[in-house]
Amino acid sequence: MKILFSFFTVVVLILLAYAGVNANMHFLFGAVIPYIAVAVFLLGFIYRVLKWGSSPVPFRIPTTCGQQKSLPWIKQNKIENPSSTLGVITRMFLEVFFFRSLFRNLKTQLYEGPRLAYGEAKWLWLAGLAFHWSFLIIFVRHFRFFMQGVPSVIKTIEGLDSFLQVGVPLLYMTDVIILGAVTYLFIRRVFIPQVNYISLAADYFPLFLIFGIAASGVLMRYFFKVHIVGVKELVMGLITFNPVEMQKMQEIGVIFYIHLFLISMLLVYFPFSKLMHMGGVFLSPTRNLANNNRMVRHINPWNYPVKVHTYEEYENEFRDKMKKAGIPVEKES
Amino acid sequence: MKIYDGGKIFIGLVIFVALFASPFYLNMGKAIAKPELKFDTPEIQRLEKETGKKQCVEPKEFMRGGHMQMLNNWRDEVVRMGNRDQIVIAGQKFDKSLQLACMKCHSNKKDFCDKCHNYMAVNPYCWTCHIQPKEKQS
C-alpha cells in the first residue's frame, strides 16, 4: 500500500510533466517550476537548519563506541570516543564521507531456545556508499550544463566516470551504479521483514523519485535523444535570468522536461523530508559533540537566573526574632 | 530566535549556498555565446547547386542526437566486419567514413564539430585514431 502509493505518486508526476509539455506549457515546466523549486529548496534548507540550531543541547550526548579518555595508561579511542575538536572533526569526516556508523550495522536473528544472534550486515553500508557517491559525482558532472567555460576538474571527473569507453555516448559508470544501488535499497525495504515493518511512504517515495530521475536521465542520454545543445541553452538562460524563446524550448524532447520536473519535485520535497539528513548529519549531537562531560563544565543553556535568598539576607530579616528566641546570630546588628 | 553554535552553523550554510548557487553568480554578467554552426563549405555549396538542397545522410533532427551512434556503427561495420558498402543518399554515393564522407562536406571542423563539442564540454575520441584535418582558417 505504502509502496504503491509512492510508486503511483511518481507515475503521476511523470504523466503531469508529459501532459504539460504536450499542452505546450514548456515555459511552466522549463522555467517557472525550476525557479520555484530552487527557491523552496534553498530557503527551506536554511529554515530547517536554523530551526535545528535554535534547539538547545543541554548536555553532551555523543554515542560512544570506544574507550573514553581516562587515566594516562588507559588507551583512549580518539575517533570513536573523541574528547577534542580534532577527534570530532575526524569522526565527522569519516561519518560524512564513509558512513562509518553504518559500517557497524548489525542484523539480529532469533533462533530456537530462544537464542538471539547478531551478525554483520554490510550490504546497507556498501549500497548506501555506492548510492551517495554516485549521486554526488552525477551532481558534480551536471555542472557542464551550468558553466560557460567548463572547469577542467569537471571534465576530469567526467572522463574518469566514462573511463571504460563503452558505447556511444560513453557509458557513465555512476549511471549503472546508482540505478543498481537504489534498486537494492528498495528491495531491502521490501524483503527484510523488520525493515519492511518500519518503512513508510516517506521512505519509498524518495527512492522511486530518485530512481525516476536517474532512469529518465539514462533514457535521455542513451536512448531517446534530445537536442542537448538546446538543453544547455535553456539552462544557461535560466541561470542568467534570460530564458530562451518558446521555439527553442519546443525543440527539446519531452523526456528532458520529465527529468527536469522530477528534479524540481525532489528539490521542493527535500526540505520537508528525511532527505534533510544532508544537513542534519552535521547537526547530530550524537556525532558532533566531544565526550568531555567530566573535563569541561557544561551549563544548561536554558538556565534562567534563579532568585536566591542567602543566609545573610535571612538573618537580616529575622535578626530581632532570632535574638529574642535565643538563637545565635552571626552579626549582632 | 537564539541560534546555538551560530558561528559554525552560519559558516556551514554559507558554504552550502555558495556551492549550490555557484552557477548563478559564476555566469553573472557573462555574454553567453551560443554555438552557431556553419554550413557553407565549398563542397556543401556545390551539393546545394547540384541537388537544389542541403542534404546530409540523415535529417538534422536525427543527426543532432544520433551522429555519434551512426559513426560508431560505421566504425564497427567497416573496421570490425570489413563491410565497406557505400550508402546512397539522393542519388549520391557516400563512403561509411568520417574523413572521406562526413569531413568531405563538413571540412570546417572548427566551425562545425568543435562548436557544439566545446560548448557541451564533450571530448570525443575520434581524433585519437583519425588524423585531424588541417584548416587554413583561424
Image: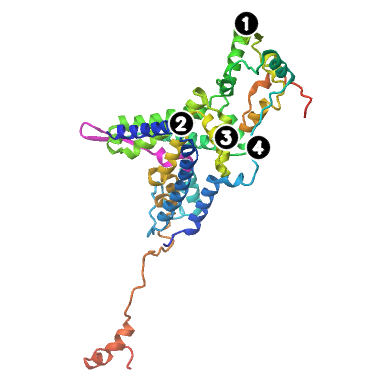
Magenta span of residues: A96-117
| Distance of label 3 from label 4 (alpha carbons) | 11 Å
Taking the image as drawn, is residue A241 in sight? Answer: yes
Q: Given the image, on which type of amino acid does mark 1 rest? A: Asp
- Chain that bears disc 2: A
User: Do labels 1 and 2 touch, CB within 8 Å?
Assistant: no
Q: Is residue A255 left or right of residue B88?
A: left
Instruction: Judge if badges 1 and 2 mark residues of a common chain.
Output: no
Indicate yes or no whether the magenta region holds residue A114: yes
Q: Which mark is residue A237?
A: none
**Which label belongs to residue A214?**
2
Residue carrying label 3:
A232
> How far across and down, in percent of the image, does residue A21 sit?
45, 32
Residue topped by disc 1: B85
Q: Residue at x 57, y 34 (%)?
A: A232
Q: Earlier in the sequence, mark 2 or mark 3?
A: 2
Quarter the N terminus of chain A occupies:
top left
CA gap, disc 2 to disc 3?
18 Å
How far from the left and from the top, in percent, is residue B21? 54, 46
Disc number placed over residue B33 in the picture, else none: 4
Amino acid marked by disc 3: Lys
